[in-house]
């Protein structure tokens, strides 16, 4: 069973939050898959991971590039993890995985988008129904994460 963490973005957007969480995952020695809801959004995230910090970047590749299995961080729109990822980030409406080989799955959603909130609620029920350990995190007014459930 995977741990499934829901991240309810309130005050800081995905672009300000995702790189930090991916960097922490890499510090743990985990390979990462980030699944986006569209090719256009994946391209934006691809640029973001190279430029999010003036002094740092996150080495990564996309599933359409050669040898995706060698990438420590892989961006994709498909339900795949050729790099043996221990953690999967679902962003911009990407659906739950068909298989659950991950130690952790993180669903990030915009709390200001009611369709995204409704999608997260549906995913929560599905994940709980499958017996996964589920945790819900919400940003406070200062952008810090507070465990809510």
Image: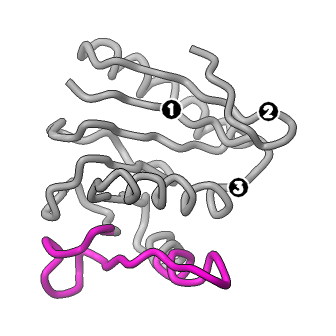
- Which color mode does the image show? one colour
Q: Residue at horizontal 31%, vertical 47%?
A: 87
Q: Give the extent of the magenta segment.
A: 46-74
Between the C-alphas of marks 1 and 3, the distance is: 15 Å
Q: Residue at horizontal 32%, vertical 37%?
A: 104
Check if residue 70 falls in the magenta segment.
yes
Q: Residues within 10 Å of mark 3 (few under 14, many from 20)?
A: some
Q: Residues within 10 Å of mark 2 (few under 14, many from 20)?
A: some
Label 3 sits on residue: 13
Q: Residue at horizontal 57%, vertical 58%?
A: 20
Circle nearer the N terminus (2, 1): 1
List x then y, in percent, for residue 137: 60, 29
Asked if residue 44 lies left or right of residue 60, the reply is right
List x then y, in percent, for residue 6: 51, 32
Mark linked to residue 38: none
Label 2 sits on residue: 140
Q: From this viewpoint, which residue is outermost toward the right?
A: 141
| Quadrant (top left/top right/bottom left/bottom right) for the C terminus | top right
């Amino acid at each position: 069973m995977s741990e499934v963490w829901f991240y309810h973005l309130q005050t800081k957007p995905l672009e300000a939050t995702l790189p930090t969480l991916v960097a922490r995952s890499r510090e743990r020695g985990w390979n990462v898959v980030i699944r986006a809801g569209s090719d256009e959004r994946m391209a934006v995230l691809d640029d973001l991971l190279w430029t999010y910090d003036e002094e740092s970047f996150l080495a990564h590749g996309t599933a359409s590039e050669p040898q995706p299995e060698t990438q420590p961080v892989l961006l994709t729109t498909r339900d795949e993890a050729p790099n043996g990822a221990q953690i999967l980030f679902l962003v911009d409406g990407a659906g739950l995985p068909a298989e659950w080989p991950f130690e952790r799955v993180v669903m990030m959603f915009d709390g200001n988008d009611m369709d995204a909130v409704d999608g997260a609620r549906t995913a929560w029920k599905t994940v709980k129904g499958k017996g996964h350990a589920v945790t819900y995190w919400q940003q406070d007014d200062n952008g810090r994460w507070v465990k809510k459930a």
